[in-house]
Image (cartoon, rainbow, N blue to C red):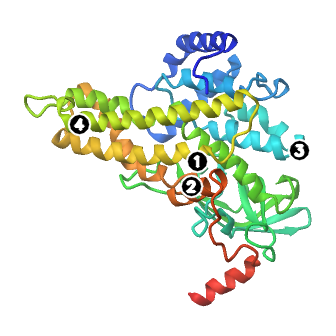
Amino acid sequence: MNFDDSPPDALLRSEFATWLAANAPAFELKAHLPRDEEVKATRAWQAHKAKAGYAAFTWAKELGGRGGTQYQWLLFAEEESKYRLPIDIPHGGIDLVLPTLMKFGRPDQYQPLAERTRTADIIWAISFSEPSAGSDVSAARLKAVRDGEDYVFNGQKTWTSWAKFSDWAITLARTDPNASKQKGLSCFVLDMRSPGIEVRPIRYMEGEAHGFDEVFFTDVRVPAVQLLGKEGDGLKIFLSTLSLDRFTTTSHREISAVNFEPILRLSRAITDGQTRRIDERDVRQRLADYYVDIRGVQNLRARHMTGMARGEELGPQTAIGKLVLANRLQEMAAFTMDLLGPAGVAPEAEYAADLAAVHEAFFMSAGYRIGAGTDEIIRNSIGERVLGLPPDVRTDKDVPFNQLSETAAKRQ
């Protein structure tokens, strides 16, 4: 593992830092915006990056990218994370969906969408989870029945990120109910404006609908040419996308979301009348523990980056950082709310922005332990696919999915 940039990478990082210093401040958020306005702001920032050649950095030059490596893109992401920029909605399409299409799809499937994705004219949804298929995505029930040159979709997805604002989506559907649940899934790209698609926002506990939605499909016709790969390839494609997703949850932007710096500032600012909270022994110990954990995740990420610099692909080990980070986020947010006491209700103006960041982490933190795989699923994945431990017992592995459905119905 190497923490130092090579001379060419150091030069590239300097280029990124210089460009961002001249351009990012104009797009930084000065105050909390309604979600619709923040989406407009993130489209504008993405389009600005695209004009300068800093969007879709790893894409081939003929697709509008710079033909850079994943490692070089991460250098840009590290520098970009130093600014308070709008939510990164285009990330799903640029860093997850289009690379998946380029890996498993045909040029005619991704080339017409690439430029509009790069400039954020198209926003992508990643629609895998269902009410009965969250952690176990192979239990998906959304039906896709072949009818001539189309597939007809009926069913439901949930926890779909940014579905309300999305133009296109990548999704899993069951094309062969006679195959086992792992083998009967296929992957599609589809137009979210297709007739028969209904999006319903999911409201969080504080009352806002931040970006997760339910999606309902009623006789939605999806052209067969939008099948990604072959029928039955769905789970393989999903796992490839998931590895990318879990890696991005330990990005510098996500690590910043853990709010260590705001917690540190708040602990220095808040007193019990005479003593700063950071001067209390127990508080300092907790802060030190959190700092060590975050540095550990950063070091693990550095190891992944070193591997990518050598041309290695991401694998199941990306789940380790996600598991640690999600748990620490929840612990840190709860600890800080306890630390604040009454000050958490009526904050002083000088640290109101830090408090807002902690509030958001407090309400959102449980979701981090669910998204991209629950803690339990991730522990299984690490045990089986990283440590080589005996696999969990799966009695349904080779049972046709339609028989599983009938058995479940009888039990109900």
Q: Farthest left residue?
A: 274
Q: Is residue 251 visible?
A: no
Residue indicated by mark 1: 319
24 with respect to 117 (left or right): left
Marks 1 and 4, Cα distance to the nearest angstrom?
29 Å
What amino acid is labelled 1 in the image? Answer: Ala
Residue at 61%, 32% in the rendered image: 303
What amino acid is labelled 3 in the image? Answer: Arg
Residue indicated by mark 2: 378
Marks 3 and 2, Cα distance to the nearest angstrom?
31 Å
Give the number of marks: 4
Query: Answer yes or no: do the residues labelled 1 and 2 have beta carbons within 8 Å?
Result: yes
Name the element at disc 3: loop
Q: Which mark is residue 106?
A: 3
Residue at 72%, 35% in the rendered image: 117
Name the element at disc 1: helix
The label nearer to you, 3 versus 2, is 2
Marks 1 and 2, Cα distance to the nearest angstrom?
6 Å
Q: Nearer the viewer, residue 187 or 222?
A: 187
Of the numbered discs 2 and 4, the one sitting upstream in the chain is 4
